[in-house]
Amino acid sequence: MILETSDRFTVVQGYAGVGKTTQFRAVMSAVNMLPESERPRVVGLGPTHRAVGEMRSAGVDAQTLASFLHDTQLQQRSGETPDFSNTLFLLDESSMVGNTDMARAYALIAAGGGRAVASGDTDQLQAIAPGQPFRLQQTRSAADVAIMKEIVRQTPELREAVYSLINRDVERALSGLESVKPSQVPRQEGAWAPEHSVTEFSHSREAKLAEAQQKAMLKGEAFPDVPMTLYEAIVRDYTGRTPEAREQTLIVTHLNEDRRVLNSMIHDVREKAGELGKEQVMVPVLNTANIRDGELRRLSTRRHIGTHLSRWIMCITGLPVSVRMTG
């Protein structure tokens, strides 16, 4: 559809693991097979440097969407009229683009006579800026939409669970995950492993475990060596795996605070196990404060300095982190 359609704007909805990057490689391969006189120029646009890097790895000449908007508008202001009549734009991770940037990009591409394909996944990361133009293009516009649903990146054991999540059937997805037993994961000798692939930790459960442990200690009885909290369960599950298994493991958290706690706990366990070197370095970590453009225009984000108003929102915060270098 990307190469055959004559529509100015088209949409590709691709769920996680369906091979969107492979799709770009296929597009570039097909383009390079065309006679040079008929070959369109393909330009990738991404909302983040990571998206740009992935497109470049697929052979697409890519830049950030912000730099494209800036460069093209500078050309217009200098009196130039950009010519995109032989240009095909591939806009990746479109779900992360807000209303303003999407509208500006489409207006500039249309003014230059170009074509654009917006690719992404509405179920993944959303835009910081207001609006969900990628979702609206699929439901409220006349643009043709191609939906990629065939999972190619997942293991056969988990593929059905992913399909269930795509179809919003969470109960069936969790049942599918149960088919992959924790015992199948390679672990170090004597390491703790959860009984089930899906384990629920609640505050009440943690409180009951702590109470039971305290009673056992008062009676002088042995208490089972089990994790007492969700954090401890995740850390013991991860650090108990073999190095090869850890390389294939990704811990996903809902909050940045959870991520920081888990990283710190895993670091401490590995340090005590002698897996890290003796050299210790303090590294400042910068965290971006995602602030919407509209909030920066509100009076509440400003303060008086004499007769002037100035913005006082701090956009970057720093946290010191202790790191021991690997030997």
Image (cartoon, rainbow, N blue to C red):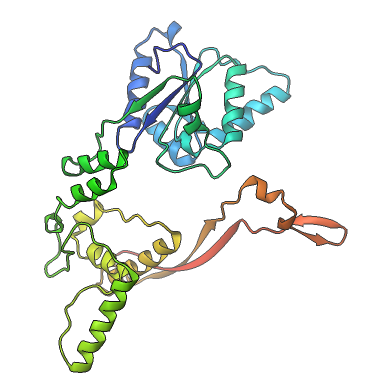
On screen, residue 24 above or below 211: above
Give the farthest residue toward the bottom: 219
x, y (%) of residue 50? 44, 41
Observer-nearest of 10 and 204: 204
Above or below, comparing residue 274 to residue 42 in the picture: below
Q: Quadrant of the N terminus?
A: top left
Q: Is residue 251 left or right of residue 6?
A: left
Q: Is residue 117 above or below residue 64?
A: above
**Residue at point 24%, 61% (across, down):** 199
Who's the residue at 46% across and 11% down the image? 6
Quadrant hosting residue 76: top right
Residue 198 in picture, x, y percent from top left: 22, 57
* Residue 158 position (above or below residue 214): above
Left or right position of 281 against 162: right
Residue 92 shows up from this direction? yes
Residue 8 position, x and y percent, is 51, 16
The residue furthest right is 307
Q: Using residue 114 as the reference point, say whether residue 294 is left or right of it.
A: right
Q: Is residue 82 left or right of residue 89?
A: right
Q: Quadrant of residue 74?
A: top right
Tell me how many marks there are. Answer: 0
**Quadrant occupied by the C terminus:** bottom left
> Where residue 194 appears, x then y in whole percent?
18, 64
Q: Is residue 324 visible?
A: no
Q: Name the residue at 26% across, 77% down.
A: 209
